[in-house]
Image: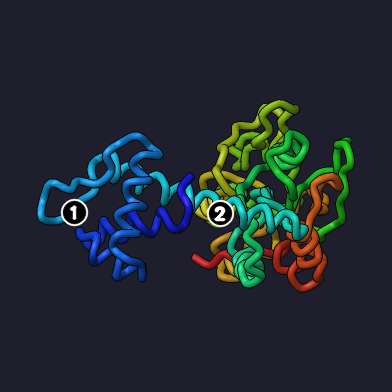
Amino acid sequence: MLSDDELALIQAIGDTGSLTRAAAVLGKAPSTVSHAARQLEARFDALLFDRRRYRLQLTPAGQLLAQEAQRLALDVSRLTRRVKQVAGGWEDRLWIVIDEIMEFETLVPVIRAFDVLQSGVVLRITHEVLNGTWEALRDGRADLVIGATNEPPAIPKLRWFELGVMEWVFAVSPRHPLAKVREPLQQEQLLPYRAVVVADSSRTTERRGYGWLSGQQTLAAPSMRAKILLQRDGLGIGWLPRRRVQALLKQGDLVEKRVADAREPNVLYVAWRSDHTGRAMDWWLSQLRQPRLAQRLVQGVDVVV
């Protein structure tokens, strides 16, 4: 590792091409700079400065030393900041998994507010679906999960609170054959038509699904928004978050249908493990407990297309 003075010496010689000018930049006598340069070469047992030409230049070995020394200095500086950050109670990083049922744009203002803290904590935000969200927390792929559905599973040191309740509406395109069928719709009336689903992202546990019947054909969509658009275009049927399709229902792009077996509202959860807490986690939990933010997250953004 080079000292700050040695790094400054190499930089000054490389920039000026002259011991005299380098000495002026460094505020030292030329003889002192020349002696320091030779000591540096002796330390590495390598020719670092090309003195054969009119302009003093770094040799390839000197260029390599300068580049690597600067990189190492930056690494040490970053490591020093991270050590101070963790010593101050901030985590090195915070991994957040959002259930896909949530909409990412509702979290953007929260991320902006977190940046204002200048904590240095690295955020990693991804999404999962249904059991995949809980699984990410259990397997260490998440420190915090937002919007998880189903009852909290048995996970060591699990902590959680309810974010809110999501209500559902069974909706079809006005062009779909079910649009004009007399209500309430029975299961046997739904079975011949394809259900649009957002597939469970679980990797190891049993995958679950909502809104489709045993033996019914399904179309797996990559997101809830995609599911809404597919149903709007008559490519399938199923349950949709009521608040997110209000505009589509009002303007007639979707038609609400009553069914005999109504879907119960889903409780959405915020969850974390008590052995993975720090100042960043505490800050996020305090934000998510605010009723107005929780309401925005649960209700989402009304789809208007």
Does 116 sit left or right of 291 as displayed?
left
Q: Which mark is residue 56?
A: 1
| Point 72% across, 54% down: residue | 86
Question: Disc 2 on helix, strand or loop?
Answer: helix
Question: Disc 1 on helix, strand or loop?
Answer: loop
| Point 68% across, 33% down: residue | 202
Residue labelled with disc 2: 78
Q: Who comes first in sequence, dot 2 or dot 1?
A: 1
Does 18 sit left or right of 216 as displayed?
left
Q: Residue furthest front?
A: 31
Instruction: Report the Cα–Cα distance between label 2 and label 1.
Output: 32 Å
Please tell me how crowded label 1 is: few (under 14), some (14-19), or many (20+) other residues with Cα within 10 Å. Answer: some
Q: Quadrant of residue 136?
A: top right
Q: Percent from the top left, x then y, of residue 82? A: 64, 54
Q: Which mark is residue 178?
A: none
Give whichever of 139, 216 is nearer the camera.
139
Q: Percent from the top left, x then y, of residue 193? A: 60, 38
Q: Residue furthest left?
A: 54
Q: Percent from the top left, x then y, of residue 85? A: 69, 58
Q: Look at label 2 and name its amino acid.
A: Arg
Say how many tags the image has: 2
